[in-house]
């Protein structure tokens, strides 16, 4: 008899959970669209190439979201935060991103972990649906141009790269808990990844730093743009360089994560606030 009552109680709990988490069986998107951020672009000078928006899909079943909400490891933290650590990620079509950019994305994860003394950690998810942060790559067409002018005794080669967002991040939150982030990194078409020639389309026009990747990842942690030029969250980081850098041009162009952001991340995720 006791066993029967116990079984009934268990069944009720499951049903109740199912009722509260799936009121009508339909996926409810997270309540708050924190921001839908795009990098700066000189639209007044250049027609803005159409970039595909990250496709919003029901990444986590509502049940999982609520369970995670109930198990917020950082429930004492009032500011926006991921409710667990490590934060998981998945690089969609990693082959399409290419080895260079995939490495740069992973370097950005390490940069943030190192800067925070491993208070912030990342782990690879099995698929994009279960990942906290979904990363994908896209390539912008007709953005790079190389012209060669031949004169009597010299040649002038001119390279131009249209100004375009290097990264786009969409971050979703429920209350003060981050629920999902979509990061799209934009490379140039016509190079290693798309035409199998030349350097990476993510390298051309940059200094090879992880500034864009770190910047987008920090959007995924709830950080918005800063007007401070020295901040990694200055939107100019999204449109860092326009042309292939001349030798020495990259000197001093690396940007560290702002000390204030690092300190806040450490405070939030170091477990200091845990009860
Ligand atoms: Zn940005």
Image (cartoon, rainbow, N blue to C red):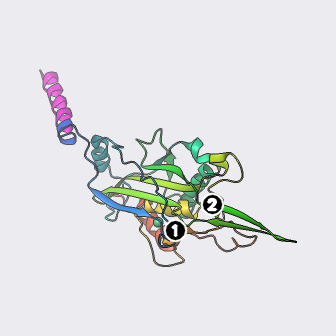
Q: Secondary structure at mark 2?
A: strand
Which residue lies under the disc numbered 1?
Answer: 46
Image vertical order of residue 147 relative to residue 54, above or below: below
Residue 210 can be seen in this image: yes
Locate residue 79: give its quadrant.
bottom left
- Residue 144 has which mark? 2
Rendered-image quadrant of the N terminus: top left
Vertically, is 52 above or below 239?
above
Task: Tell me where residue 24 appears, x and y as whole percent.
Answer: 18, 38
Specify the farthest residue to the right. 153
Residue 140 in picture, x, y percent from top left: 55, 55
Residue found 42% across the figure and 51% down from its top: 54
SS for callout 1:
loop
Where's the C terminus, which quadrant?
bottom left
- Which residues, given as a range, are shown in magenta? 1-17
Q: Is mark 1 within 8 Å of ligand 1?
A: no
Q: Is residue 42 left or right of residue 32?
A: right
């Amino acid at each position: 008899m006791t066993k029967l009552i116990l079984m009934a109680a268990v069944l009720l709990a499951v049903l109740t959970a199912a009722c509260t988490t799936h009121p009508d069986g339909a996926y409810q998107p997270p309540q708050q669209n924190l921001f839908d951020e795009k990098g700066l672009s000189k639209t007044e000078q250049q027609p803005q190439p159409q970039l595909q928006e990250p496709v919003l899909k029901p990444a986590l079943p509502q049940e999982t979201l609520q369970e995670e909400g109930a198990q917020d490891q950082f429930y004492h933290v009032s500011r926006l935060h991921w409710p667990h650590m490590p934060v998981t990620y998945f690089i969609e079509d990693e082959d399409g991103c290419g080895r260079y950019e995939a490495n740069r994305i992973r370097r950005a994860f390490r940069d943030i972990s190192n800067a925070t003394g491993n208070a912030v950690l990342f782990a690879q998810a099995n698929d994009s649906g279960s990942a906290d942060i979904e990363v994908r790559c896209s390539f912008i067409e007709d953005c790079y141009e190389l012209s060669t002018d031949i004169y009597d005794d010299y040649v002038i080669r001119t390279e131009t790269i249209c100004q375009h967002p290097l990264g786009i991040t969409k971050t979703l939150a429920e209350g003060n808990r981050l629920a999902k982030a979509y990061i799209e990194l934009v490379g140039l078409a016509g190079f290693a990844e798309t035409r199998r020639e030349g350097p990476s389309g993510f390298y051309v026009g940059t200094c090879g730093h992880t500034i864009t990747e770190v910047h987008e990842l920090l959007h995924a942690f709830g950080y918005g743009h800063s007007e401070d030029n020295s901040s990694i969250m200055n939107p100019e980081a999204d449109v860092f360089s326009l042309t292939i850098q001349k030798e020495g041009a990259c000197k001093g162009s690396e940007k560290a994560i702002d000390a204030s952001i690092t300190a806040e991340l450490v405070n939030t995720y170091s477990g200091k606030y845990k009860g």
